Image (cartoon, rainbow, N blue to C red):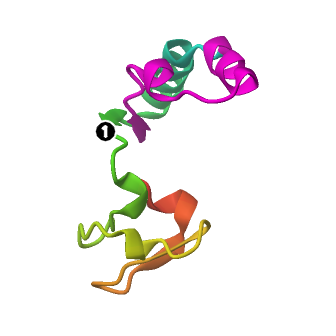
Amino acid sequence: MALENLLGIRERAKGSKKFNRMMSGWNFKELASFIEYKAALAGVPVIYVDPKETSKTCPKCGNASRYNRKTQGWFKCIKCGYQSDADRVGQ
């Protein structure tokens, strides 16, 4: 299982007053701890990845292109043709 490294997310993600309030209410470390605990019980390793470019990078061939995501919900690699729901592609 892969989780995004969210270190510094509050500093990087700035938006409206409502958005900032919502972000400051989340305890990312606690959530990650819960996921790590449950994954360990199931014998699943957890790795942390840099979120940069993950939504545009093909998990099969590694091609990173903004053209791989022509729509918000669908991923299609322009190099190897791999296709999937965009939510499943993030590495």
Report the number of numbered marks: 1
Q: Is residue 38 left or right of residue 48?
A: right
Identified by mark 1, the residue type is Asp
Mark 1: give few (<14), some (14-19) or many (20+) Cα within 10 Å.
Answer: few
Tell me the residue at 33%/45% (across/down). Answer: 52
The quadrant in which residue 87 appears is bottom right
9 part of magenta stretch:
yes
The quadrant in which residue 61 appears is bottom left
In this view, the residue farthest toward the right is 18
Viewer-side residue, 8 vs 49: 8
Q: Is residue 91 visible?
A: no
Q: Which residue is mark 1?
A: 50
Q: Is residue 41 visible?
A: yes
Tell me the residue at 53%/19% (across/down). Answer: 28
Tell me the residue at 44%/27% (across/down). Answer: 12
In the rendered view, tell whether residue 19 sits above or below residue 53. above
Tell me the residue at 32%/70% (across/down). Answer: 65
Viewer-side residue, 4 vs 1: 4
The quadrant in which residue 90 appears is bottom left
Q: Is residue 67 left or right of residue 41?
A: left
Q: Secondary structure at mark 1?
A: loop
- Return the x and y of residue 80 as percentages of the image width and height: 29, 85
In this view, the residue farthest toward the left is 62
Q: Is residue 3 left or right of residue 28?
A: left
Q: Which residues are magenta?
A: 1-25
- Return the x and y of residue 47 as percentages of the image width and height: 32, 35
Q: Is residue 87 left or right of residue 58?
A: right
11 part of magenta stretch:
yes
In the rendered view, tell whether residue 19 sits above or below residue 61. above
